[in-house]
Amino acid sequence: MASMGRLVGRSAELEMFDRIFGTAVARGTTLMLTGEAGVGKSALLDAAALRASEAGFRVLFVTGSPFEKCVSFSALNQMVQPLSDEIPALPVRQAETLQAVRGLSEGQPTELLTVADAVHVLLSRAAADRGPLALLIDDVAWLDRPSAAVLGTVARYLHTASRTAHTGSIALLAASRTSDESFLSGTGLPAYEVQPLDDESANTLVAERYPALTARVRRRLVAEARGNPLALLELPVPLNDAQQTERGTLPAVLPLTERLKRVFSTRIGALADTTRKLLLLAVLDGSGDLHILRQAMGGPDGLAGLCSAERAGLVHVDTATSRLVFRHPLTRSAVMELSTSAERRWGHRALAEKLPEGSEHRARHLADAAVGPDDQVAALLYEVAYSTLHRGDAVGAVTTLLRASELSSTGTAKGRRLAEAACLGANITGDLRNVRALLDNAGDADPGGTDSLAAATAAASQLLNGEGDVDTAHRLLAGAIDTHVRSGKTDDNILREALNTLLMVCFYSGRPQLWHSFDSVVQHCRPPTSTRRLPVILGAFGNPAYGALSVLDRLDELISGLHEESDPVRVFGTAVSASYVDRLPGCRSALRRVIDDGRNGGAVALAIQAQFLLANDAYAGGQWDDLPEMTEEGLGWCATYDYRLPASSGHFLQGLLAAARGDSATAREVADRLVSWGNPRGLGTLRVYASHIRALSALGSADFDTAYRLLRALGTPDEVPPYMPHALWLMLDFTEAAARSDHHGEASAHIAAVRKTDIPSISPRLAMVTDAAEAMALPDFIDHDLFEAAIATPGAERWPFDWARICLAYGERLRRAKAGVDARMHLEAALSTFERLGAAPWSARAANELRASGILTKTVALGTAAPSQLTPQERQVAQLAATGLTNKQIAAQLFLSPRTVAAHLRSVFRKVNVTSRAGLRDALTATYATS
């Protein structure tokens, strides 16, 4: 594609770059270049850099490297380094964050969102103070995970801002192979697929670069390359003079990638040994830092061999950053292929010798230099594995543990590290299917270690998540933890995983006796630093009715610190503690980070749980249109990775939504499936889930006797069941069912028990439903104070379904007491909320109450003037819908989601009293005609 300094066949792309950099001066822009290997993405980025520079942009170039992919923030440092002089002028926290990322301070980098914010501020200020910036990122699939996450977030910021003209003069262009998943895959950036050259351009390129080739040979090369510019430029190189003539015979057709590797190997093989060693060091180091390469080569003359590699067109030196840059990724592959294992080990040792003690890079280079077992290096890698985990890279942690096991000389150490890899895989990364094989290998290495805490935890996790066998899992864990604690071992990391697994065993069992054993274990093991959150989890999640109040202050502290938390295990522990005490909104951002990591192949097992926690929050917050997509993604992961028990949480939420919206067939099917799978396994929580779904379905259809029978079976009314966190979600359901089925005494007894445990003090929502439930429990008296207090709860709009049910209950009683005007206000509020949620049976109950009092007819009659009552955004949506646009088209025009458009339309239809777009058009036309 590049011929004598110009690009052939890329005029459209160059014009596009000119438009991009012209637009970016005013409002910024983003673009993702995709295409097959060798199609010319890197050459286009080079051309974009030149165009940007000519347009007055300062260019920052970042290139991914497969050998730096495991080095945290290596790619980000490529970008930040040229802007290092501008970091001190940033706000203190952001400057400290970037210095930590650069390794220039003793502090550890904070959570990735904070790093992304700091980078975004740095770029924005640099663009504002010293002119526009062009950020060019090549080989995005090879960026290290932390850099990828940060740059992905920055890319989303820039893309969103560019659509609203709220950004500085920043242009971001990135390039990746079409088949590669990367940090930019899910960001929504506009993409441009770079196509192979057409035949005319391909012929021109080959003819200009290789004028001596005959037409026949050129036609053969063009046909074989199929428009791939790299193949067109490199395939002629190994041809001898005879092969370039009419009588010559070209080599037989081979796969393109193999031919290109052969080409690069030929050119590299012609270099002197010193030069090839220098290139090998550059590949193994990954950073291209000339200072490191000079030291590793032995001193001041270490770069003497660089000139011949530059003349061969394999590399060039970026003078702005003093880094060695390979002209194409395949050059690096060829360097590795031509090197021997002994040469690679020499290279790793040479690099390790120049790195400081305790450096992660040094440990990894020493590991790659090792020929056989090396316990000292294995111990270093073991420490690196858990520091990698705590930074949020669970996959990297497991991979490092496996390498540490390979380097272990004793069966005991090898078996322990294999078992720990299995444990982290089962609990965090989603490698449930590999647990058995890893444990078998661990047992072969150390037959006496099969009952170790790590092995027991991995086996228990497989039994729990895959089979739902809580009893066997509990026996394994309880015994192993007890043995571990009595032995005096202080392995914080694996003890944390064991206790977290035991926690979920107890939760799904739904049995107090298992929770008692967990409580005993926690008290006896005197949890070390990594497990000090367990009392919070036990109190707020395990037994919130009786234990939450004593730990809420600590939980609130943990939630407030989630923005700085990169460890996905700690994020999950905090979020699950928040789930039953109505504090999930404070965990949303952190949970989304865990989910994004799972989407990128990271902590999949925790991403499943995080997705269902967010779906829980969506249900409570009335974001019901978002819930199906959220649960389907989580259930998809469960099916892919065989996490059958966690899938029950997703099914429960789907069943609950179906019940609330009146899809009784789906609700019944989900409840039946939960019971049929859970009962034989002793999974009490699944039985509670099923009862909740069935009872809510019965309440919606006003079948109070059935709802009462279902919920009464879960416990005695005069006690809030201990170690049943779900009881906090059933107070309103049980009280309404009991009161409406003439069991007022039991309803009152239940609320008295709730008040006795001081549950209302846990959260405003629980205070709201307790007041309402107490009012509902009274048989012949309307307690206006309780109902009014519940309805006026600060922030009640955060729980719209609960709030609307309270309005409905109050309105029902007011209507029966002949307080028609007051009843109408509350019944209409309930009806409006139910309709927005799509809670059809509850809408019908509210409408029936209005109709019974003669209010509904009057309300409908008033609806003919409703267009004037629309909000500005509803009016916009209505006008576009009346023209015939689909929800998706309206969403695109107004920068909304299709779900939001659907919600607005439901509200519009109700206010205007129509049921179709055609009716809406007529209503709006009539309104505007008379206005």
Image (cartoon, rainbow, N blue to C red):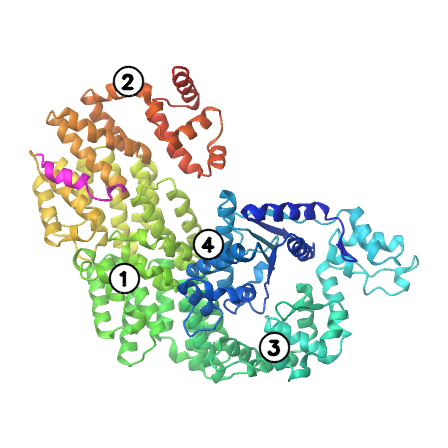
In the rendered structure, which amino acid carries the disc numbered 3? His
Query: Which residue extends farthest top?
Result: 930
Q: Which residue carries the number 2 mark?
A: 861
Q: Do the residues labelled 3 and 1 touch (CB within 8 Å)?
A: no
For disc 1, the neighbor class at 10 Å (few under 14, some 14 to 19, many from 20) is few
Name the mark on residue 291: 3
Q: Are marks 4 and 1 in contact (CB under 8 Å)?
A: no
Q: Earlier in the sequence, mark 4 or mark 2?
A: 4
Spatial separation of the CA atoms under disc 4 and disc 3? 46 Å
Is residue 835 at least partly visible in the picture? yes
Task: Give the SS element for disc 2.
Answer: helix
Q: Is residue 198 left or right of residue 56?
A: right
Give yes or no for residue 795 being in the magenta stretch: yes
Spatial separation of the CA atoms under disc 2 and disc 3? 82 Å
Tell me the residue at 21%/21% (across/down). Answer: 855
Identify which residue, 530 or 681, lies in the foreground: 530
Residue 28 screen position, x and y as percent: 55, 48
Q: Are marks 4 and 3 in contact (CB under 8 Å)?
A: no
Give yes or no for residue 253 being in the magenta stretch: no
Span highlighted in magenta in the image:
782-797
